[in-house]
Image (cartoon, rainbow, N blue to C red):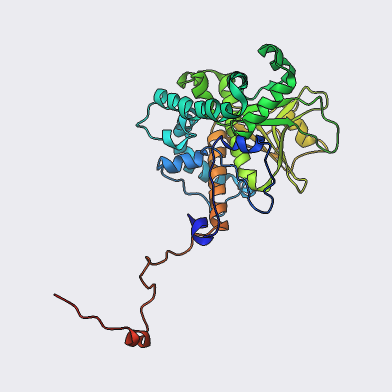
Amino acid sequence: MTAIREYPRTRIVATGSAAVLLRDTKQHESGVGRWTSVHVPTLSFYEYGQLRQLEFPQLPANLTLDSLVSLDAKGREEILSACLPLQREFNRYLLQGGFPAFVSDKIPLGMAQRLLREDVIDKALKRDMAHLYGARSLGQIDQIFVYLCFNSGGIVEKSTLAKEMQNVSAGTVENHLRRLEDAHLIYRLHSSKLGGKKSLKPRQKIYVADPSLRNAVILRGEGLFNEATELGALIEACVFKHLYAFYYPEQPSFGYWRSPRGDKEVDFVAVFPDGKRLAVEVKYRESPRLGSKEGLAEMVRGAEAPERAFLVTKNTADFGPAEEEKSIFRIPAFVFTYLLGHIEHQRWRQAIPVPPQKAPYGQESQPLSKEAAERTPKTEEKS
């Protein structure tokens, strides 16, 4: 509303998965200088808390990731204590918190997942894409998306996936993956190339765009919290979604890192236009020990060490510099995702301040001067 009020000649168009139609049409033309596309992801944990009307933690003013890392033990303890009440909401957010319509307690999980399948998946795949690609391609796209929901966060070999689908080429699989990406249903990460070195054979990791969407497709409920491996992959997807949304204005190149020998890995690496790097590893388990031979430890000690490195964990005790490597900052997943949303919100408030409210149309914001009042025609009051 601020943009519309302050720039009345600006036109804002919101699209859903139908945006993929614009990208694939043969008549597509460049909009450089005439329009700007902005990706709006599903709800962050912070935005979910706003809609749930949760009590906001009292956090330091102008908090940033850099200032967070620089805090002393007392400062970290104050932030952790303020955020602790949010911990119990995090699991609910993972199950059904990514879409505004299903945040309310009045909608049970089963109904929310059914509506997600009908309103999001069916419309995105069975209406928008079917209109452009036809029934046969629709079946292939749907099959690939279900496969990705079961294997979110895993390495995807297009040739292997093509063989499993039978009579489908690797090129066709690539086209379908691109369409799912254009529809904002998945994120794709490639092995990062740091320092100009040649990367390994290109292999991509794929994450479903929102954890609650993935759970709705493959019917995962509260039982997934007892499956450590599956839960770890779900948290990875959640963390990346928050990283992508948080750094979107800076346009970094996202990928994952693998050691030259291919035996070690870091989940997420962001390379910014100025050359700076951020590394994030997710270890969502009870004892996330960071051994000296772990991928993140090797990366921060190497010649291509990132300027900032985070180890996202499960336990609230993991909040501060890692004992094994002080340049790595440990932080619980629910705190990390919430703080990213909080910092992003504060950043936008500073960039786009809310203007003072104007008086309703037809009313003067200031009283008339004496001279203006004398020139105003008098009207007789009728009883």
Q: Quadrant of residue 92?
A: top left
- Residue furthest toward the front? 27
Observer-nearest residue: 51 or 26?
26
Q: Position of residue 107 (x, y in %)?
A: 37, 29
One can see residue 287 in this view: no
Q: Note whether 217 is above or below 300 in the view shown.
A: above
Observer-nearest residue: 321 or 222?
222
Observer-nearest residue: 232 or 139?
139
Q: Is residue 246 left or right of residue 163?
A: left
Q: Is residue 277 left or right of residue 363?
A: right
Q: Quadrant of residue 132?
A: top right
| Residue for point 75% across, 47% down | 273
Q: Quick one: quadrant of the C terminus?
A: bottom left
One can see residue 239 in this view: yes
Q: Note whether 180 is above or below 33 in the view shown.
A: above
Q: Position of residue 270 (x, y in %)?
A: 71, 39
Q: Position of residue 271 (x, y in %)?
A: 74, 41
